[in-house]
Amino acid sequence: MWLLDTNALIFCHKFLKKKPFKKNYTYTTIFSLIEFPKAVKYGEIIIYYPNAITYKESLKYALKLRKKGTPIPTIDILIGTIAVEKNICLVTNDADFEVLKAVEPRLKIISSENYLENIQKIK
């Protein structure tokens, strides 16, 4: 199962003619849909919404990142937090998530290209 960041949604939308998404395997967040609303047309994608725990954990990560001198955008922290909470692999080409991974090693990340290779193997 994969959680697509905004840049992964855009990548898949832009470069593929066939739908690269499989139901029950592909997720995104409400934040990514707000950033790229064209993706709402893909009914195969399940949408995650943050809850109070998501915000609380995100604040902890933000404080750790700021203390290290490596703050990243709030939305990236929230998306990464959801990936960790759901124990799902984040699909992204955004280097900010590697910074988040430095304070939260449970964050699993793959590139959009790797996602496409993997998702196409599923029937």
Image (spheres, rainbow, N blue to C red):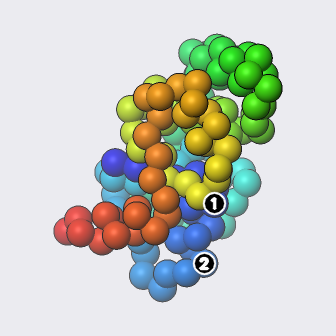
- In the image, 122: left or right of 37? left
> Which of the labelled discs sits on residue 14, or is there none?
2
Badge 1 density bin: few <14, some 14–19, many ≥20, Cα 10 Å: some
Element type where label 1 sits in the image: helix
Element type where label 2 sits in the image: helix
- Expressed as whole percent of the image width and height from the top left, the position of residue 36 reads 69, 60
Mark 1, residue position: 7
Residue 54 in which image quadrant: top right
In the picture, the quarter occupied by the C terminus is bottom left
Badge 2 density bin: few <14, some 14–19, many ≥20, Cα 10 Å: few
Q: What amino acid is labelled 2 in the image? A: Lys
- What residue lies at 53% left-to-right and 71% top-to-bottom? 12
- What residue lies at 49% left-to-right and 59% top-to-bottom? 111
Of the two numbered discs 2 and 1 on the same chain, state the one appearing first in sequence: 1
Give the vertical position of 23 relative to 80 (above or below). Answer: below
Give the vertical position of 106 relative to 111 (above or below). Answer: above
- What residue lies at 34% left-to-right and 57% top-to-bottom? 23
Depth check, front residue: 16 or 22? 16
